[in-house]
Image (cartoon, rainbow, N blue to C red):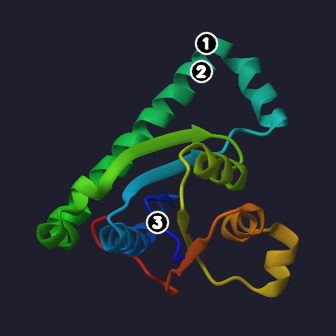
Amino acid sequence: MLPEIKTILYATGLGPGAPHVFRYAIKEAEKHGARLVVLHVLEPLNPFGQHLVELHISHEQRQQIQDQARDHARSKIEERIRRLCEKEVCHATGGEDLVDDILVREGQPHLEIVACAREIKADLIIIGSHRHSALGESMLGHTANRVVHRSEIPVLLVRIPDGYHEAGF
């Protein structure tokens, strides 16, 4: 029996390649009649950075800044989706309606992506990937690589062309 794809998780870092990857996410959602959930993960400060910040501002102020960052990321994603749909994708496909939810979380991106996929019972994860050298990959790791190795479901890696930058995003 062929697998059924009902829910797709599109994980985005909001980089210049995001529109390129989003087109694939919309196309896959359309092709399978699946709902599309968009996820962006904000990385927290490391403990040293948190300590430095809390020397200068209160915990409440730090929390307020984090809440503002989360709201800003969500509105940025919504705006990008709207612009891309107006520009090309959604005129013919109703693509804006395919986006079922937009989530913004805080944590280590690869862990949050895999956890979110599990929570929403995603059947497929779509994530963009830049070309990296083998040395850079082994030393630094890479979110997409880590997701592929941790995920229990298929992951579609969309290669972002070198130097790709979408005008207006």
Circle 1 is placed at which residue position? 60
Q: Mark 2: few, some, or many residues within 10 Å (few <14, many ≥20)?
A: few
Disc 3 on helix, strand or loop? loop
Residue 110: image quadrant is bottom right
Give how far apart the Cα atoms at labels 2 and 1 are: 5 Å
Q: Which quarter of the figure is the C terminus placed in?
A: bottom left
What's under tag 1, amino acid-wise? Glu
- Image quadrant assignment for residue 24: bottom left
| Outermost left residue | 91
Residue 8, horizontal then vertical, whole percent? 47, 60
Give the mark, 1 or 3, whose residue is nearer the N terminus.
3
Picture disc at residue 63: 2
Of the pair 144 and 150, the residue shown nearer to us: 150
Q: Which of these two is toward me, 46 or 125?
A: 125
Question: Given contact means CB atoms under 8 Å apart, are the residues at marks 2 and 1 in contact?
Answer: yes
3D distance between C-alphas at marks 1 and 3: 42 Å
Earlier residue among tags 3 and 2: 3
Separation of marks 3 and 2 at Cα, in angstroms? 37 Å
Q: Position of residue 51 (x, y in %)?
A: 81, 26
Q: Which residue is located at x 72 percent, y 50 percent?
A: 111
Seen in the picture, residue 56 relative to 11 is either above or below; the reply is: above
Q: Is residue 58 visible?
A: no
| Element at label 1 | helix
Which of discs 3 and 2 lies nearer the camera? The answer is: 3
The front one of 59 and 159 is: 159
- State which quarter of the image contains the N terminus: bottom right
Which residue has dot 3 on it?
Answer: 5
Residue 115 vs residue 135: left or right? left
